[in-house]
């Protein structure tokens, strides 16, 4: 089979490496991929947002199956456009991807179907939003409606911050059109858990749970990033919590989307907070998480392509989705200064022993050599029979990889370790 993966980061590298394990796979093309993936796939310089070019390439190359990984092309209708040309896909159509594409949609869905989430109000008018935050309980959470590269959420500790957040989104439009509508919601507390789930619209099969580390610096300090590391499973996701999530959140969400005529197929990501009142949804993503995928897929024992095809063709109920009972830890090596200002273009040295553990997010080529080309450069994932073992091995491997200005958090998994004891 000839496969196409749309996207270009560490998550896509992890997907490619897992798909390659299936002997039926002859070739994988990644659009656009990055130079760090070239040993595993053919990278073609087509933007993940250029839907006509993606479809054109897929048709000409006679792609048998396409995996659309990032949020942008899903929300823009890449799956719809590929399917129209007879190319089956992993991922939701645009009508279902809206669950991530519009926070207003997601919140209204949860309210309508009684799915637990933070209480909220939505606004499309600056003055009413400002009037609301002048009396709302603090801290208060202000969110831009649309995709904002994971940055459209501001937790305001006081009235001034809340007003600034509203103004920056609605008046200054720092997130562009995403800020035309905003959600202002109740601040929730409790540990966060990421659960990715395969679904074909009828059955939902959650993957192993994981924990992201979003802040740039040790001790959960510094600015929010795309994710500095992950561990799986997440100790806060106990069997009792899992059972409640299935009953109160996962199944009701899938059913709600069906009733709305927006059947979701692919990977639905539940960003959960385990509050004192039980698990609540913080956000939905219409895709695999990054860097959650880099710990979840290495623990998947079933064949990824078989499971993906089952979501496309409605066979998930009879398809086994089995995970190892090991632990995984992924440490992200980033360029110093990320997520703000950083330099790139430094030679990247990855010893052969580490290669199999590495998922490259941002690399380019200069004079035939791999060089850094992004804020998050790569992730190193190790497995272990204990979480401690997985963490130790991930750091031992990370320390064998070199590039100038590299930095990583030194406490990935520390909170999970403490909670698990
Ligand atoms: P996001 O950019 O959507 O991933 O959100 C960033 C982070 O903001 C989440 O991971 C949570 O830590 C936090 N967050 C979002 N909504 C709330 C909320 N209602 N209460 C507390 N924290 C929140
Ligand atoms: N790790 C969070 C995300 O993929 O949005």
Image (tube, helix red, strand yellow):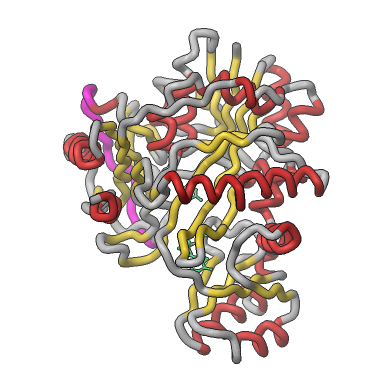
Is residue 373 shown above or below 64? Answer: below
Identify which residue, 128 or 378, lies in the foreground: 128
In the displayed structure image, the side of residue 291 where residue 87 appears, left or right: right
Query: Residue 195 in the image: x percent, y percent?
Result: 50, 45
Q: How many marks?
A: 0
Does any portion of residue 407 appear in the rendered image?
no
Query: Residue 45 in the image: x percent, y percent?
Result: 56, 31
Query: Residue 17 in the image: x percent, y percent?
Result: 43, 24
In the displayed structure image, the side of residue 234 where residue 354 appears, left or right: left
Report the residue at 65% width, 28% height from top.
311
Does any portion of residue 122 appear in the rendered image?
yes
- The residue segment tinted magenta is 340-353
Quarter holding the N terminus is top right
Query: Residue 348 in the image: x percent, y percent?
Result: 27, 36
Is residue 110 shown above or below 13? Answer: below
Report the residue at 47% width, 17% height from top.
20
The answer to if 305 sits in the magenta stretch is no
Report the residue at 59% width, 73% height from top.
185
Quadrant of the image occupied by residue 346? top left
Quadrant of the image occupied by residue 80? top right
């Amino acid at each position: 089979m000839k496969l196409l993966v749309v996207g270009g980061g560490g998550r896509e590298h992890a997907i490619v490496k897992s798909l390659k394990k299936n002997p039926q796979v002859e070739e994988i093309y990644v659009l656009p991929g990055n130079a760090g993936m070239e040993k595993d796939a053919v990278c073609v310089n087509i933007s993940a947002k250029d839907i006509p070019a993606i479809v054109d390439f897929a048709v000409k190359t006679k792609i048998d199956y396409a995996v659309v990984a990032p949020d942008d092309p899903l929300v823009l209708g890449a799956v719809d456009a590929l399917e129209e040309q007879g190319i089956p896909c992993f991922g939701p159509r645009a009508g279902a991807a809206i669950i991530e594409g519009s926070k207003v949609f997601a919140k209204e869905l949860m309210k309508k179907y009684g799915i637990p989430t933070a209480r909220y109000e939505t606004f499309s008018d600056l003055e009413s939003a400002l009037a609301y935050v002048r009396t709302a309980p603090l801290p208060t959470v202000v969110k831009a409606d649309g995709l904002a590269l994971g940055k459209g959420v501001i937790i305001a500790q006081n009235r001034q911050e809340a007003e600034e957040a509203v103004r920056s989104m609605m008046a200054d439009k720092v997130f562009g059109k995403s800020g035309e509508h905003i959600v202002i919601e109740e601040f929730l507390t409790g540990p966060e858990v990421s659960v990715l789930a395969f679904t074909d619209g009828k059955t939902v099969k959650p993957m192993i749970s994981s924990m992201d580390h979003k802040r740039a610096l040790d001790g959960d300090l510094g600015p929010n990033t795309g994710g500095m590391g992950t561990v799986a499973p997440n100790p806060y996701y106990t069997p009792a919590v899992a059972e409640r999530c299935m009953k109160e959140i996962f199944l009701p969400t899938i059913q709600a989307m069906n009733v709305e005529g927006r059947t979701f197929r692919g990977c639905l990501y539940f960003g959960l907070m385990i509050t004192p009142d039980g698990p609540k949804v913080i956000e939905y993503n219409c895709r695999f998480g990054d860097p959650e995928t880099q710990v979840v897929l290495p623990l998947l024992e079933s064949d990824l392509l078989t499971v993906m095809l089952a979501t496309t063709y409605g066979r998930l109920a009879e398809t086994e989705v089995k995970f190892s009972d090991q632990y995984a830890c992924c440490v992200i090596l980033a360029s110093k200064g990320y997520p703000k200002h950083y330099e790139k273009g430094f030679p990247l040295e990855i010893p052969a022993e580490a290669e199999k553990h590495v998922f490259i997010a941002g690399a380019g080529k200069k004079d035939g050599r791999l060089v850094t080309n992004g804020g998050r450069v790569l992730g190193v994932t190790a497995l272990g029979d204990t979480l401690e073992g997985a963490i130790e091995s991930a750091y031992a491997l990370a320390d064998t990889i070199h590039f100038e200005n590299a930095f990583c958090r030194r406490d990935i998994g520390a909170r999970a370790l403490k909670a698990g004891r």
